[in-house]
Amino acid sequence: MLAFMYKNQRYFHHNDFQKPHHSHDRGGGSVGGKNRGTREIKIVRRVLDVNDTIAHQNRELFREKGVFVINVMSSPGSGKTAILVKTLSQITPKIRCAVIVGDICTSNDADRLAGSGAPVVQVNTDAFGGDCHLAAHVIKTAADNFNLDEIDLLIVENIGNLVCPAEFDMGENLRIVVLSVTEGEDKPLKYPLMFRVCDAALLNKIDLLPHLDYDRETAVQNILKVNPQMPVFEISAKTEEGFESWISWLTQKLHG
Amino acid sequence: MHEMGIAMQIIEIAVASIPADLKNAQVKRVNIKVGKLAAVVPESLHFCFQIAAQDTPLGDAELNIEEIPLKIKCTDCNVEWTALDPVFICRRCNGGSVKMLSGRELDITSIEVED
Ligand SMILES: Nc1nc2c(ncn2[C@@H]2O[C@H](COP(=O)(O)OP(=O)(O)OP(=O)(O)O)[C@@H](O)[C@H]2O)c(=O)[nH]1
Ligand SMILES: [Mg+2]
Ligand SMILES: [Zn+2]
């Protein structure tokens, strides 16, 4: 899980791996590092290009239908559902919303979100992609459940995970990462890709700060190290503190 | 976490790239590039690849991962550097308008097939 830190350690060993390892190469074994009797076929393709292609199709479809899509990501339990429930209650029905929620085994989140009156589709991740993220084809199928002509904002709550969802484009317009003050201040540095690919960060559960030894200044600084231009909204899904600026930013993006 | 799905994609692309005149050939090696910032742990990818490659033309193939460093460029003062930490603040001017030159790769570059 600590992909970056882990690879960092490897990085320092990297030179060891690059030493020529020819000692075991005998006559017919290999020549110049390649096996004799093999043909090299150049490919040069993104490993995830099937996903990228579907994401591109999704993006075209959503643009055509005038649907704005946001992808909300975080570790398990940072407060994605809680934030979305409060956000929905403030913006519906003026903004016509729909929700796709990825959940591994329960329908709890879908039930909580459906309280807003917005149509909610719950998707269980398939064995192919693993249980760790939503991919473009899942969104494409889930979106079939809605009448896109009647939707302004499609909100996707991704699976709780800071690693994998960052690699998978779904055709969204905005990516939002949620970090709560009960998690380590160094998370942005441990999961840099997530914080790099997102357009805004929500630092959630600030109502708990008086009870914690949390250095919010450091947390914000770490987010800004990875993504210096990212807007960071400090909020509480419990008290709705900070929601005004988060929602005005979101609606501005939606209408811009 | 998602390395199994990635391994399966690599195998699918590799199998589809075996030339028609070598239909029953074994793939000896698959060369891929993985950026330092990519959300992939090479060890798990090796492990998943080995499992997923069984009973495919890649059953004996070696997965060769080239790790690509994180390179950043400041769009204000044009300085370029290789970052060992995921910090996207310009080394020279402290600015934040930078772009990533490399480090996000997750590309399959070639396969080596028995001739
Ligand atoms: N005190 C406090 N608790 C919160 C806040 N936001 C969420 N919680 C609580 O944190 C727990 C997890 O919140 P969820 O909204 O389920 O988190 P999630 O990110 O959707 O979780 P998964 O979907 O399982 O990944 C729940 O018990 C929430 O009530 C907040 O701002 N303050
Ligand atoms: Mg949830
Ligand atoms: Zn600079």
Image (cartoon, rainbow, N blue to C red):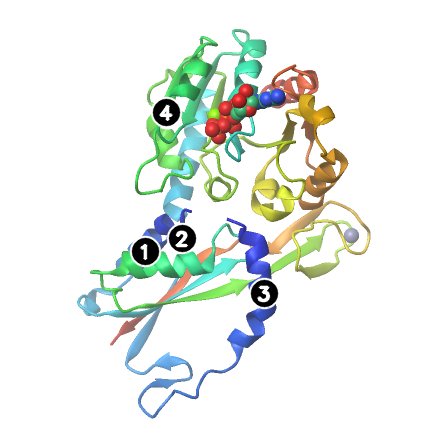
Marks 2/1: CA distance?
A: 8 Å
Q: Nearer the viewer, residue B35 or A58?
A: B35
Marks 1/3: CA distance?
A: 28 Å
Disc 2 C-beta below 8 A from ligand 1: no
Q: Is residue A160 left or right of residue B19?
A: right
Q: Residue extending furthest bottom? A: A27
Q: Residues within 10 Å of mark 1 (few under 14, many from 20)?
A: some
Residue A125 x %, y %? 35, 34
Q: Which mark is residue B13?
A: 1
Q: Is residue B35 left or right of residue B78?
A: left
Q: Which mark is residue A106?
A: 4
Splitting the image into 4 quarters, where does residue A224 fall? top right
Splitting the image into 4 quarters, where does residue A64 fall? top left
Q: Quadrant of the C terminus of chain A?
A: top right
For mark 1, name the chain.
B
Marks 4/3: CA distance?
A: 40 Å
Disc 3 C-beta below 8 A from ligand 3: no
Depth-wise, is mark 1 or mark 3 nearer the camera?
3
Query: Type of residue at label 2?
Result: Val
For mark 2, name the chain.
A
Q: Nearer the viewer, residue A79 or A202?
A: A79
The answer to whether marks 2 and 1 mark residues whose Cβ atoms lie closer than 8 Å is: yes
Q: Which mark is residue A11?
A: 3
Query: Type of residue at label 3?
Result: Tyr
Same chain, marks 3 and 2? yes
Q: Nearer the viewer, residue B40 or A54?
A: B40
For the point 71% across and 45% down, the residue is A225
For the point 45% across and 33% down, the residue is A159
User: Could one spot residue A142 in this view of the protein?
Assistant: yes
Per the image, the residue denoted by label 2 is A47
